[in-house]
Image: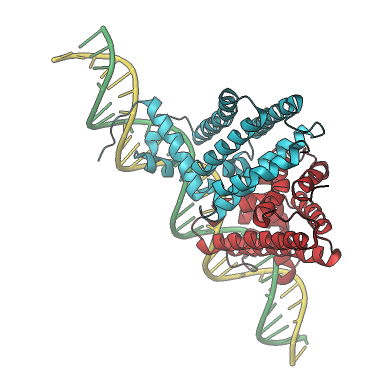
Chain colours: A cyan, B red, C yellow, D green
DNA sequence: TATAATAGTGAATAGTGAATCACAATTCTT
DNA sequence: AAGAATTGTGATTCACTATTCACTATTATA
């Protein structure tokens, strides 16, 4: 049966979405044009009506992730004003994002994706460090208003902040979704707080 | 020129070593029989004298990583007796291991490796949780002797412990080795300590 | 409604990588 | 030193993947 004719704009979104799903379920190695096309419900060659190449699909996927990542920071800043509540909200969003898009940590880790693509590698590098800077900025603001200890090194603390979610993502990943990420985040948060909060 | 004849036992070690190097430098996607063989200095087909299949190579690589991981815990327990110094030593070893074998986080993260291999996936899952239990045990001992606060949840703290090294590994990875892992560990350690140490 | 533009299809092509095999060189055993 | 065992080699097969292309169906437009 012939697939319905759908405009490129929508097909592109579907392709990105399905590519993320495929990576999340079967790993980056399993990301093939045929695999994506099948999930979208079109024939492999039809995919080329919407993307010039597989690399173009990957670039679009990266852009999608970038948007999500920075979107979180923007939204969190708009949402609340205190440093600690911003960090907590960011943590929860990040946790939700990782469980929704299991593909994200896989992609970020996967050297395979940027082997032979230096631009892509530096792009990923740039948006991870950009994300970290966003966190650092929140931490600095907390130091200013006294909700975070003055001797906390923002760059170290931001990496540790990432450290709350990353190993949880690995466990969640490896256990096939059995690890309770929300519970971990809830338990880990006060522990993290203790390491950066002023003495009581 | 024909490669020298080397006994299987040694070739197997070389193959595992070179496979790790190849993954570390070019990603799991770049792991090919031809690629490994080239690094070892033999012809692709010769590799089959030493491993039945590519999957067999991967299993051996996993076993190698497992050994290293648990070896660290054993050695650390033998080395010192206090919980905190054991944890610190473990952290340093872990950091060294990750920078020596950049492949390790890539492999652990890569779903591609165990897609369609449930045994392999559960094996990885088992040795990560086993490693975490080793850390938890050290933490529990610290709680007993009072060097770690009684209200620290060992399972949460052990995941956070991993969180010191994991994001650092990502950054190191993505930056192409530019991130100073040792410095991060040195800075992060006292912050982590503060979150689990008794009140002064 | 005729025509142009858009999106989908199946077949064909070229490249790549894992695995096999018959054969050659080297090393071990006796 | 003869024969067996081990390891290395090159050619080849097989499956799979990205990509192209001529053609067809559908939708928009004039």
- Residue B73 lies in quadrant: bottom right
User: Does B90 sit above or below residue B199?
Assistant: below
Residue C4 image offset from top left, x and y in percent: 30, 14
The relative height of residue A152 versus residue B47 in the rendered view (above or below) is: above
Q: Is residue B41 visible?
A: no
Front-most of B82 and C30?
Answer: B82
Q: Quadrant of residue A161?
A: top right
Question: Which percent across, then down, holds residue C8?
Answer: 31, 34
Q: Residue furthest front?
A: A200
In the image, residue A155 sits, relative to residue D8, either above or below, namely: above
Image x and y of residue A115, in percent: 64, 40
Q: Position of residue A156 (x, y in %)?
A: 76, 37
In the image, residue A24 sits, relative to residue A137, either above or below, namely: below
Number of disc labels:
0
Compare residues D5 and C22 and report the one nearer the observer: D5
The reply, left or right, for residue A176 in relation to residue A122 is left
What residue sits 77% from the left and 55% below the top?
A: B148
Q: Is residue A76 visible?
A: yes
Q: Nearer the viewer, residue A76 or A94?
A: A76
- The residue at 84%/64% (across/down) is B81
């Amino acid at each position: 049966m012939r697939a319905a004719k759908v405009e490129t704009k929508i097909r592109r979104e579907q392709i990105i979405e399905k590519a993320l799903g495929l990576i999340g379920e079967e790993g980056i190695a399993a990301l093939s044009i045929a695999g994506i096309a099948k999930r979208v419900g079109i024939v492999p060659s039809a995919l080329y009506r919407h993307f010039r190449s597989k690399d173009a699909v990957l670039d679009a996927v990266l852009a999608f992730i970038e948007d999500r990542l920075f979107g979180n920071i923007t939204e969190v800043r708009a949402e609340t004003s205190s440093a600690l509540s911003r960090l907590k909200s960011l943590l929860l969003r990040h946790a939700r994002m990782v469980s929704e898009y299991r593909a994200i940590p896989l992609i970020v880790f996967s050297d395979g994706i940027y082997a032979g693509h230096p631009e892509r590698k530096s792009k990923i590098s740039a948006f991870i460090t950009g994300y970290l800077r966003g966190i650092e900025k929140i931490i600095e603001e907390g130091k200013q208003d006294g909700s975070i200890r003055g001797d906390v090194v923002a760059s170290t603390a931001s990496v540790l902040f990432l450290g709350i979610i990353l190993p949880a993502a690995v466990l969640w990943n490896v256990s096939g979704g059995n690890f309770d990420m929300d519970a971990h985040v809830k338990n880990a948060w006060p522990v993290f707080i203790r390491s950066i909060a002023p003495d009581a």
